Amino acid sequence: MPSSTVENYVKQMYLLEQELQPDLVPMGRMAASLGITPGTATTMVKALAESGLADYEPRSGVRLTEGGRRLALHVLRRHRLVEAFLVKTLGLDWSEVHEEAEQLEHVISDKVLERIDVYLNRPRRDPHGDPIPDGRGRIDEAREPTLNDCSLSSPWVVVRIHDQEPEFLQFVERIGLTPGGRVEVCSRDRIADAVTFRNHHAKEISVSTAVAAKIAVAAPPNDVDTQGGTK
Amino acid sequence: MPSSTVENYVKQMYLLEQELQPDLVPMGRMAASLGITPGTATTMVKALAESGLADYEPRSGVRLTEGGRRLALHVLRRHRLVEAFLVKTLGLDWSEVHEEAEQLEHVISDKVLERIDVYLNRPRRDPHGDPIPDGRGRIDEAREPTLNDCSLSSPWVVVRIHDQEPEFLQFVERIGLTPGGRVEVCSRDRIADAVTFRNHHAKEISVSTAVAAKIAVAAPPNDVDTQGGTK
DNA sequence: GATGATACTTTGAGGATTCAAAGTGCCGTC
DNA sequence: GACGGCACTTTGAATCCTCAAAGTATCATC
């Protein structure tokens, strides 16, 4: 049985691999994202390599092995299904479930997980729009365009928020960009570092490109009447 | 934040105090019920005493302090509400939720706990009939009669099973004694170590007094039509 | 190619929890 | 009142995870 610590390490390694798409995740990144000192990261990652979950190249970085990836996706599945469950069933706010799930992801049995999955009708995404790996460890890793990349003056639907900070999520909600919500980017000004869009209330709002990069969108579904945010 | 280990120690101490009603819980009992060696129990209990959760008297035993009792009841509340939730909402079997709750009880936040409590309409008992402490740490510690004590040839209702073993609980279910089920004790034979009762199917069954001691009953509600088990 | 800055690793140590095994106190029996 | 046995405690050690601080490799720059 992997410890919670090990689960956190591989989960974080997976997330960093996805985010950075590097050949190897640098140790510094691992340490920073886990909130531990670099020395601790080195020690633990070596142990992870020992147990076959990661490939470690001193002074270069780490990479998950196939087994490590499998474990990471299992943890991620628990995390995201729990988030969805907390929001849909117990009515917690989508901005606050990440923290809860950080704990629960380590103690949910396969039996309970399967019940939750069925209960929610096998959801594909969690409340933030992050894809939920299926029971066999398959996950949709497609990279959607963001408010920084999508075409101007055409309709889009918010599908994912690349941030878990409650404050950021509440901000995103305030400007009408929850997953499922419609958007249309009006203009971009790289110099002013600003992206201006119209939300589903037809209200015009500007955000920095750093914020825009965290809002992933997709082409809206064909049926005309789908409107407004999830909330 | 108390660790899971500390929570388990105080919870177990509370349960043993309730079960044995002793002045002090002997160290051996603590060790045995936690599945640890006596030496470990001594060490940990001394630490518990240090942090004000227990009063420890060397070579005699331990007792929870007021603070320890408060923590124990908080853990117990989480444990039992989780059990109820798993059965009622996710449809797990009442015989298997104890193990699940053993893990979950340490990571459920107050926020989630409150949601569960409301969702279940503030239940008073868990699926085994164990009383659920309320948010202020109040609990109904009343000791109900068992199949060993209750009057013969009068109707009773099973209210609580004093055992968490899945096999025992499944056995109890097979003989028609789930909480809510009607029973009537036909006879007792102390020599044969047997208690004979009629379950809600009017079937006559005998069990040992050890088993009978684990089946707590109460006077049936007044309304005549309440019949049959919970299941 | 020497110099430094930066990132990474190593080392020593500490807390929490556990065990095995050796030591000690207590209690009933003769 | 000495003896045994049993329950309990102490001791030494191990595991897991962490940190601070000291050491080292690497890379850009001069």
Image (cartoon, coloured by chain):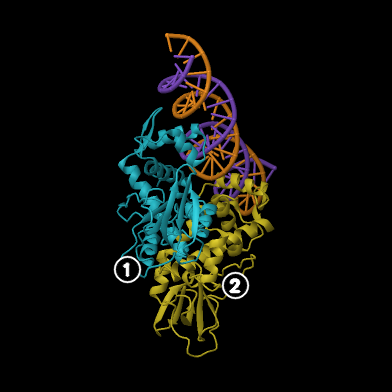
Chain colours: A cyan, B yellow, C orange, D purple
Residue A203 in percent (x, y) is at 49, 61
Toward the bottom, the furthest residue is B224
Q: Which residue is mark 1?
A: A223
Q: Which residue is mark 2?
A: B143
Mark 2 belongs to chain: B
Compared to residue B46, the image places residue B183 above or below, namely below
Residue B25 in percent (x, y) is at 62, 56
**Label 2 – label 1 distance at C-alpha:** 62 Å
| A103 or B211: nearer the viewer | A103
Q: Amino acid at mark 2?
A: Arg
**Residue at 34% from the left image edge and 35% from the top image edge:** A23
Compared to residue A215, the image places residue D9 above or below, namely above
Give the numbered dot on residue B208.
none
| A115 or B129: nearer the viewer | A115
Q: Is residue B195 visible?
A: yes
Q: Is residue B185 visible?
A: no
